Amino acid sequence: MTRNPQLAAWLIGQRAQIDAVLAAKLGPAAPRAGAEETEVLRRFRSFSAAALRHGEAAQPALDGLRANERRVAALLTAWVEAAAEASGPAGDGVRKALRPLLAHFQGRLKTTATSRRKRGTATRTRRAVISAIDRVADAFLALDADNARVVDANPAAGALLGVARDALLGLDAMSFVPVPVRNDWWTELDAVSEDAEPRRFLGQLQDSQGSAIDVECSVTRFSTRERTLALIVARPTT
């Protein structure tokens, strides 16, 4: 790779500006202080600055990280885009310099992950289900009924809420619900926990920029030994 100490210094010096652009882009999906993905982002920044300063990419420090791989990938990609936007006319050059480092970092993150999905028929079946959900035009959200955390989502949900689908994983879904109607959503999640019957309701969501979206939702319960999921399909009504 090409040595670029000027860009390394700029990334460090403009960290606050880049983070502000990232927060504006992601809204509620932006990483919170103390979150696991915030630590991953910090290490990526340090890795990128060191690589640009010295002209070679050393092995990134990844010990102890347990963040969701898909969410981290979406957030790191968004950070690279935020850095490019913050640099103004030099954006294309920033992207060109950071994307190989992003690919290297993500590759190492994947190979050092502490857990792997089991291979075989169950995995192939799950992939087929995920593929089918991804093709659904309406927004799909799988929420933990106890805490409203997003367990899974499809690309349509990401498009509706204005963020990458994988950036939604692990978030509190209520951060995408207007405050006045959050109790209504909790009522629906409580009902799913107590009753296996499918439900329908009219509700509201809000995208990453805070714009309200009226939706018609259908909810199905899916229970395992560990938790109950509310599988929600949301269709805009306007």
Image: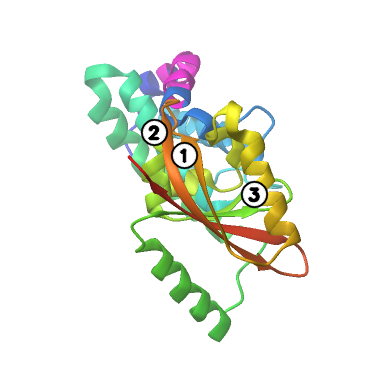
Q: Is residue 164 above or below residue 175?
A: below
Quickly name the residue at label 1: 76
Which numbered disc, 1 or 3, marks the residue closer to the eye?
Answer: 3
Q: Is residue 12 above or below residue 229?
A: above
Q: How is the image coloured?
A: rainbow
- Binning the other alpha carbons within 10 Å of mark 2 as few (below 14), some (14 to 19) or many (20 upward) gives many
Judging depth in this view, the residue of 106 and 72 nearest the camera is 72
Numbered badge on residue 80: 2
Spatial separation of the CA atoms under disc 2 and disc 3? 38 Å
Q: Which residue is mark 3?
A: 188
Query: Is residue 19 within the magenta segment?
Result: yes
Asked if one can make out residue 222 in the rendered structure from this viewpoint, the answer is yes
Task: Indicate whether 99 appears above or below 122.
Answer: above
The answer to which of 199 and 220 lies nearer the viewer is: 199
* SS for callout 3: helix
Task: Answer left or right for 67 relative to 235.
Answer: right
Q: Quadrant of the C terminus?
A: top left
Question: Which three-letter amino acid code belongs to the residue tagged 2?
Answer: Val
Tell me which label, 2 or 3, sits earlier in the chain: 2
Of residues 129 and 88, which is closer to you in this image?
129
Magenta segment: does it hold 64? no
Q: Is residue 57 visible?
A: no
Choose top left, top right, bottom left or bottom right for residue 174. Answer: top right
Quarter of the figure with the N terminus? top left
Q: Marks 1 and 3, Cα distance to the nearest angstrom? A: 33 Å
Magenta span of residues: 10-22
